[in-house]
Image: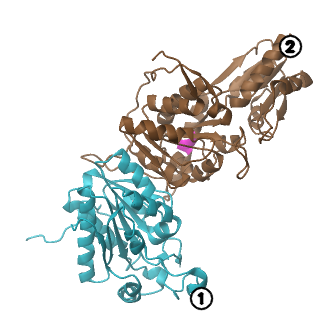
């Protein structure tokens, strides 16, 4: 597969999921992610998989739960309000350690909000959007190629850590078209799923559950989950970094905001300004060490988001003690997407 | 000595947490006997719901996945679509299935998912302490209808079996009770029939079991049994409501 395609981000996610071996998709219509169920409803039957347009986002995520509990690669996709509906079962799956992929092509909020690009769901995605205290793996693609690549990675990481994984995108990376170079799924080692339900056969009973009532049981289970999150932080942080060696100010942003920010950084470099760039790719685990290392040298950070300040809290917790963190963002809504010139002006302001 | 009565292989040799006079143990046994008779234990994946029935995995010697409240038919849909050769059943109470899980049961039934649903109707939320359920009878006092269920304000009890029978996707639907030997034997026949539908890949099958909850009804087990056979059977008529293949 060397042929380059020209596809939308939402389609790139589908192509990546199918290449990763996902044959079970369950979803419900909501803008701006409808390309995903439409694509899957067309392609999955050709591959003898299962596509269901569920009666609700709630039902869809629970179909994912059931399918994934048997060990197959299963996914759902939605957009912000629909993701809120799914959160109960995301908490269950985090607790039950059931791997799956959840795609959030997020929209502006709160409430019904609008359908424009937004990063208002950062907190929900990375801080455990459901109840009880948990984390899931969250990947934030900034290009159509990454929509494809990170979808495959998300399935692998989900299985490796027995955890739900989320792709957090928005209307920009979801609906924009860009060239995509499809590549075969990397030869990652497939992990034996000795937990997957299959009917006992001649073996022992397997149970996938999250209810622990015995003395000390739930605490022990939560410590186990906590240890897993620590291991993810140690092993799985991913980020893109450029010009950080000589930077006087470091610009950081994720997802679609990072595309605009990157252009602003290039404008600044063209004018001879020493501006560095750091883009988290994994939002959970958050690349804390990358921020710490970069701010041992560079003492100013400008965080840019399509909201009024969410990731900036994690940036502040991660940077070196004596680094200043500035923020520029606008709450999402029609007409609120910042231009590169607007961000360049912010860089100049804090430079 | 000839042994004429044994524990079904699908049930574990453990004590249950169920209250004295509760019918869950009986319904568990009938379900387990049906699993045994079709030799399904080793290929079964059960879906446990929220309520007293959540401990399915403690009593059945089968693979089990726990479902969020009311979502068991959606979870079972996912399981069955991923493993079409597995035998998949949900075991749900009336609060779970007829209130919070209404959408999931209607649509799984309407799609004609090849699963079996055992629906235990005891007209109350048992595990949470006897609150009013959609199936609570008019006038019945519960912890959240202390003056009795009010028809004007709270509507009439939902007859789920009749409701589902109207859907083309439903292949088999019956309401049974386990309050006396005659009803119990019939309940076993209908549960077996429902299982046969899935074994023969004939579509969605559903059995509603009228059951007693003496603790939350504030009755002795004998009084509770009499209530099942009396006012419950009067309102929730027993019978086979749908049997598309005449199995």
Q: Secondary structure at mark 1?
A: loop
Q: Quadrant of residue B60?
A: bottom left
Q: In the picture, which chain is brown?
A: A
Q: In the picture, which chain is cyan?
A: B
Q: Quadrant of residue B180?
A: bottom left
Q: Secondary structure at mark 2?
A: loop
Residue placed at 39% from the left, 74% from the top?
B162
> Between marks 1 and 2, how big is the CA–CA gap?
76 Å
**Percent of width and height locating residue A93:** 51, 47
Q: Quadrant of the N terminus of chain B?
A: bottom left
Q: Is A165 situated above or below A208? A: above
Q: Nearer the viewer, residue B219 or A33?
A: A33
The residue that disc 1 covers is B147
**Percent of width and height locating residue A235:** 57, 27
**First to last magenta residue range:** A223-227
Q: Is residue A348 magenta?
A: no
The residue that disc 2 covers is A273
Query: Which SS does the magenta portion mostly show?
Result: helix
10 Å crowding of disc 2: few (<14), some (14-19), many (20+) = some
Q: Is B103 situated above or below A131? A: below
Q: Is A191 situated above or below A29? A: above
Residue placed at 66% from the left, 36% from the top?
A171
Residue placed at 59% from the left, 85% from the top?
B152
**Percent of width and height locating residue A89:** 54, 51
Q: Is B181 situated above or below A119? A: below
10 Å crowding of disc 1: few (<14), some (14-19), many (20+) = few
Horizontal relation, residue A333 to residue A88: left or right: right
> Which chain is indicated by disc 2?
A
> Which chain is indicated by disc 1?
B
Q: Nearer the viewer, residue B214 or B235?
A: B235
- Residue at the right extreme? A349
Q: In this rendering, does residue A322 appear at all? A: no
């Amino acid at each position: 597969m060397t042929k380059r395609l020209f596809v939308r981000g939402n389609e790139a996610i589908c192509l990546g999921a199918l290449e990763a071996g996902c044959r079970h998709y369950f979803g419900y219509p909501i803008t701006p992610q409808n390309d995903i169920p439409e694509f899957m409803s067309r392609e999955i039957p050709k591959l003898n998989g299962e596509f269901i347009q569920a009666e609700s986002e709630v039902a869809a995520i629970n179909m994912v739960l059931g399918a994934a509990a048997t060990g197959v690669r299963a996914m759902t996709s939605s957009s912000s309000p629909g993701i809120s509906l799914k959160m109960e079962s995301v908490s269950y799956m985090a607790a039950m350690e059931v791997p799956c992929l959840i795609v959030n092509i997020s929209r502006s909020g709160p409430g019904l909000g609008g359908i424009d690009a937004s990063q208002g769901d950062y907190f929900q995605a990375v801080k455990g959007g459901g109840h009880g205290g948990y984390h899931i793996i969250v990947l934030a693609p900034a290009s159509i190629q990454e929509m494809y690549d990170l979808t495959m990675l998300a399935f692998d990481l989900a299985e490796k850590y027995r955890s739900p994984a989320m792709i957090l995108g928005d209307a920009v990376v979801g609906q924009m078209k860009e060239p995509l170079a499809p590549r075969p799924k990397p030869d990652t080692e497939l992990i034996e799923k000795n937990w997957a339900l299959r009917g006992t056969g001649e073996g022992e009973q397997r149970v996938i559950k999250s209810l622990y009532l015995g003395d000390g049981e739930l605490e022990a289970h939560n410590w186990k989950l906590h240890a897993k999150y620590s291991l993810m932080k140690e092993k799985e942080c991913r980020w893109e970094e450029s010009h950080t060696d000589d930077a006087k100010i470091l610009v950081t942003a994720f997802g679609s905001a990072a595309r605009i920010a990157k252009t602003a950084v290039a404008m600044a470099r063209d004018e001879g300004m020493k501006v560095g760039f750091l883009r988290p790719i994994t939002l959970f685990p958050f690349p804390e060490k990358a921020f710490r290392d970069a701010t041992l040298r560079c003492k100013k950070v400008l965080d840019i988001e399509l909201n009024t300040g969410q990731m900036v809290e994690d940036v502040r917790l991660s940077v070196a003690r004596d680094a200043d963190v500035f923020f520029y963002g606008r709450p999402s809504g029609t007409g609120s997407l910042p231009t590169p010139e607007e961000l360049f002006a912010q860089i100049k302001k804090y430079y | 000595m000839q042994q004429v009565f044994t524990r079904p292989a699908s049930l574990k040799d453990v004590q249950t947490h169920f209250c004295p006079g509760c019918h869950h143990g009986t319904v568990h046994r009938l379900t387990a006997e049906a699993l045994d008779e079709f030799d399904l234990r080793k290929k079964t994946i059960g879906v446990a719901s929220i309520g007293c029935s959540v401990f399915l995995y403690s009593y059945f010697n089968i693979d089990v996945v726990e479902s969020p409240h009311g979502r068991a038919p959606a979870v079972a849909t996912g399981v069955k679509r991923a493993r079409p050769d597995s035998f998949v059943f949900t075991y749900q109470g009336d609060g779970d299935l007829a209130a919070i899980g209404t959408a999931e049961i209607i649509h799984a039934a309407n799609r004609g998912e090849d699963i079996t649903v055992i629906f235990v109707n005891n007209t109350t939320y048992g595990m949470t302490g006897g609150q009013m359920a959609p199936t609570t009878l008019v006038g019945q006092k519960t912890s959240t209808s202390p003056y009795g269920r009010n028809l004007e304000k709270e509507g009439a009890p939902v007859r789920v079996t009749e409701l589902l029978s109207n859907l083309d996707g439903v292949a088999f639907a019956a309401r049974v009770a386990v309050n006396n030997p005659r009803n119990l034997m019939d309940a076993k026949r209908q549960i077996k029939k429902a299982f046969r539908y899935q074994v023969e890949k004939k579509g969605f099958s559903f059995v509603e079991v009228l059951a007693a909850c003496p603790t939350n009804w504030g009755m002795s087990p004998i009084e509770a049994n009499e209530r099942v056979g009396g006012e419950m059977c009067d309102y929730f008529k027993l019978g086979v409501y749908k049997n598309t293949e005449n199995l």
